[in-house]
Amino acid sequence: MDDSASRLSLPAGVESITAFCEFVRVGAVAAGIDGSEIGKLDLVLEEILINIARYAYAPLSGVTEVSYMPEGHGRLRVEIADCGRAFNPLDVDSPDFSRGLADRPIGGLGLFLIKGLVEFIAYRREDNRNILSFVFPAAGE
Amino acid sequence: MTIEPTELDKAVLLKVSGRMDAENAHQFEQACDHWISLGAKHLIADLEGLQYVSSMGLRGFLAIAQKLQSASGSLILCGLHGLPRQVFEMTRLIGLFPVFETTQQAIRTL
């Protein structure tokens, strides 16, 4: 993400998720993303940010940085960075969908959702930071 | 998010409206637990007014449905549409719940 990107840093807590979503929505509207897609963008952001809020720094606290820039008309590139423990969310296995209600695992749904809603998603560990970048919306949306 | 409960003969109807996100998803699970503790076996969630649900909300639906099933009860979903319906479909949870278009249809099955 180059210097022209818009950036916002806030405490990495659940209470910051709404502010991050509102921040990125501004970029989404400016990039020409259809208003009907905003709920999906909120969902992707929340699923990533809640993982950072719960696990990246626990039991201590830290900061999350969200940045974005247009990726052509109707597309937005977003990067979410934290300085917490190294964690690649893309390594998490998908839930076992073959199981019935009684045995269906409760975790792992959020990361599975993200992969279905973005066009591209990649993780890198750089300068002791976890950086997850994606392009929204998914191709064909 | 608002949750409006109505006691019926054989179930409790919970009308859920607004956004169910990381900050408030626990309220739905708490509301369901409250009615289960009072003896409700069947809960009907009217989701016509639900505009958004994230995985934190899905966890609540799944946990309550598992709890009720183990007590020979059920969590019934009605009025799922738009993004929440898409989320239930993408995570393949939709097949795990009894799902109806309207609460009247759900009530008739009890």
Image (spheres, rainbow, N blue to C red):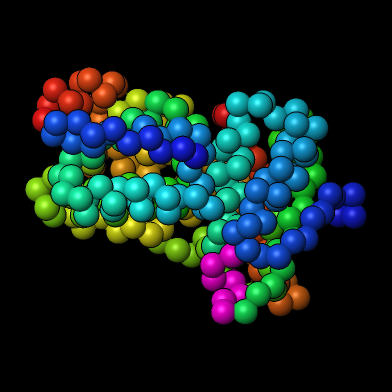
Name the quadrant containing residue B89. top left
Q: Is residue B49 left or right of residue B23?
A: left
The residue lying at 31 percent from left, 43 percent from top is B93
The residue lying at 33 percent from left, 36 percent from top is B5
Q: Is residue B37 left or right of residue B84?
A: left
Q: Locate the C terminus of chain A by quadrant.
A: top right
Q: Residue furthest right?
A: A3
Give x and y (percent) for residue A92. Answer: 45, 63
* Residue B103 appears anywhere in the view: yes
The image shows residue A130, relative to residue B99, as above or below, that is below
The residue lying at 49 percent from left, 50 percent from top is B24
Give x and y (percent) for residue A102. Answer: 18, 54
Q: Locate the N terminus of chain A by quadrant.
A: bottom right
The image shows residue B5, relative to residue A130, as above or below, that is above
Magenta segment: does it hold B31? no
Give x and y (percent) for residue B26. Answer: 42, 54
Highlighted range, magenta: A53-59
Q: Is residue A100 left or right of residue A34?
A: left
* Residue A112 appears anywhere in the view: no
Q: Is residue B37 left or right of residue A93?
A: left
Q: Nearer the viewer, residue A11 or A112?
A: A11
Give x and y (percent) for residue A55. Answer: 54, 71
Q: Nearer the viewer, residue A57 or B103?
A: B103
The residue lying at 28 percent from left, 21 percent from top is B102
The image shows residue A140, relative to residue A14, as above or below, that is above
Label tally: 0
